[in-house]
Amino acid sequence: MNLSTLFRASAPLFPPPHSTSSSRTNATENIAIEGRNLNFSTRTRQGNVVPILQDCTLRIPSGQFWMLLGPNGCGKSTLLKILAGLLNPNYGTVYVKGPKSFVFQNPDHQVVMPTVEADVAFGLGKLNMTDDEVRSRVSKALDAVGMSSFLKRSVQTLSGGQKQRVAIAGALAETCKVLLLDELTTFLDETDQVGVIKAVRNSLDSSEEVTALWVTHRLEELEYADGAVYMENGEIVMLGIQLPENPITVRLRVASGLTPFVTVAGWKHEAFALLGKKKSSSAMKPFEDNKDDVETGMLDKDRDKIARNTRGLKVHNQALLSGLAYCISSCSMILINKFVLSSYNFNAGISLMVYQNLISVIIVSTLSFLGVISTEPLTWRLVKVWLPVNVIFVGMLITSMFSLKYINVAMVTVLKNVTNVITAVGEMYLFSKHHDSRVWAALFLMIISAITGGITDISFHAVGYTWQIINCFLTASYSLTLRRVMDTAKQVTKSGNLNEFSMVLLNNTLSLPLGILLILVFNEVDYLSGTPLLRLPTFWCVMTLSGVLGLAISFTSMWFLHQTGATTYSLVGSLNKIPLSVAGIFLFHVPTSLENSASIFFGPRCGRDHLKNSASYVSLSDNYKEMAPESSTISGSHQAFCQQHKEKKKD
């Protein structure tokens, strides 16, 4: 039974609001939002009438926080726009206590001024207020959403969640009585989701006169609500209010594989206890894979199968397990690439890269087709947005390949720390982000490590170092460009979101034609047509295994990041450079000296200190790792490939 059927089964236990007396003379002060028999329709180009809302009736008391839920296309946003006065209903009456304010899904459509203070004060310009009164109003509004310390900050330096809170503060500064909020957490990560919804909850708690209607499709957000409205097919199917003495239960499938009963009325106590969640004002974890997501319109049988398959599995320390899985898959990838390129003497590293990416595309596409995961369709609009990032990514691969022909793996590891310096400077100038003295000290030590490493490098080659410096600039450009493209890409998708599976599929798919072009440019076709390795079944098995391991790096890195946090994830990534340096020296028999070895191990230590002291930069670095996990795969194959050419050149 799907969710909408269960809601309908429970609906008669709540008397519909329009069954009460139509007179509002004695209840005006207690009702903030009321709509009666609202109907709205639109016409197609062919002149056909398409109904959007049908006889929608609701009443929301003053001073309460209500949620508006329902699948895509059910009419949530249309109803919200009618309540805001942005649309006129074809039939029905609307009452919304004024003044009211509409907060958009994308904060960039609403936050327009250069600083936080100026943006919150923007709406007060129409009022006859003194400067001191404006400052006082702005200060109180920012304090209500926990942003008082950001008064003078540039809007460009804020995260998505912080921008949403600034938009809410702007509405509160105008002393609005009703907040109409359209899916504010869609573009936000988990931390920002909690911050925004708590800001709204705290604003209502501090003023009994403010009422909020929040459009969402995340059931876990009900923990913060006083009531809920569920819609489907343009109709209000159910209204829920807090009636602990007569709770309404709805069966939901959750990630654990169990099917407990969830209380819609009085959920703050019964619902989250039945879900095994403690009532808390600080934690709001979305369920894995959104298996209880109303936005899909139903909780399908395929997800039940997945739940049954995972039933009984309970890992007490998933952070440790995910970290081990990430490290094992990463090390295994390097070893398998070394085995393919060296043991089989395979001299087509770019072809190996293309095949690994192809395997990743096939696996992700198959899982999406079977309904195990969800991915966004690769539309031309999305490709146009993402293509510049992918071109920079390919440029990283080319420069990395050329640099590895002349520089040993250990020194490349050290020189890559220069990328951190370039990225930090880029953030400072492009995003007005300021770093404290500890961060700059760590960055300075990275530069010292790179310089001393180059001076003491026995196999120093100016051409290789030039290619590596270009690679550092391209890598930093990739990270800085990715920061903007991620938000833009979400806006051009059909769902308004872009999950990790979609990002992996998009990046790998776009890399295929560019990789094929590189195969032609570097003339690997002649080698592939003449090598007997392609006729060995065992070689294809090893090649396919390398592709599976490449995909494993993608998913284990996301899992590890989800279970721990950005700092832990990046710290492990930084410490992994030390065994990589050791492997590069011993496996490839690279000549080195005591001074050079000291500089090699000094660089990763500085990188660890930098990541530890700069949480803001860590987040950006993690986005790079998460969005381009195959870079680890390609890096391993190209390192082995180029080192092999280097050894042959010496012979």
Image: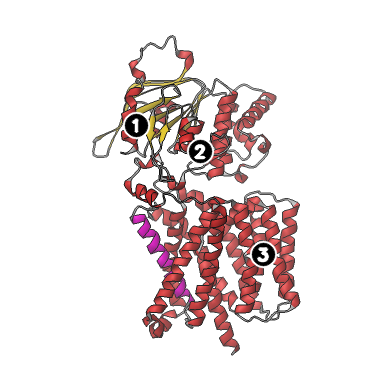
The residue tagged 2 is 277
Q: Earlier in the sequence, mark 2 or mark 1?
A: 1
Q: Position of residue 533 (x, y in %)?
A: 41, 82
Query: Taken as a whole, is the magenta stretch helix, strand or loop?
Result: helix
Q: Quadrant of residue 96?
A: top left
Q: Position of residue 504 (x, y in %)?
A: 46, 58
The residue tagged 1 is 7
For the residues labelled 3 and 2, the Cα–Cα distance comes to: 45 Å
Q: In the image shown, does 607 or 468 lie closer to the viewer?
A: 607
Q: In the image shown, does 21 or 434 lie closer to the viewer?
A: 21
Residue type, label 3: Val
Residue type, label 1: Phe
Q: How many marks?
A: 3
Q: Nearer the viewer, mark 1 or mark 3?
A: 1
Boundaries of the magenta span: 349-369
Q: Secondary structure at mark 2?
A: loop
Q: Nearer the viewer, mark 3 or mark 2?
A: 2
Q: Earlier in the sequence, mark 3 or mark 2?
A: 2
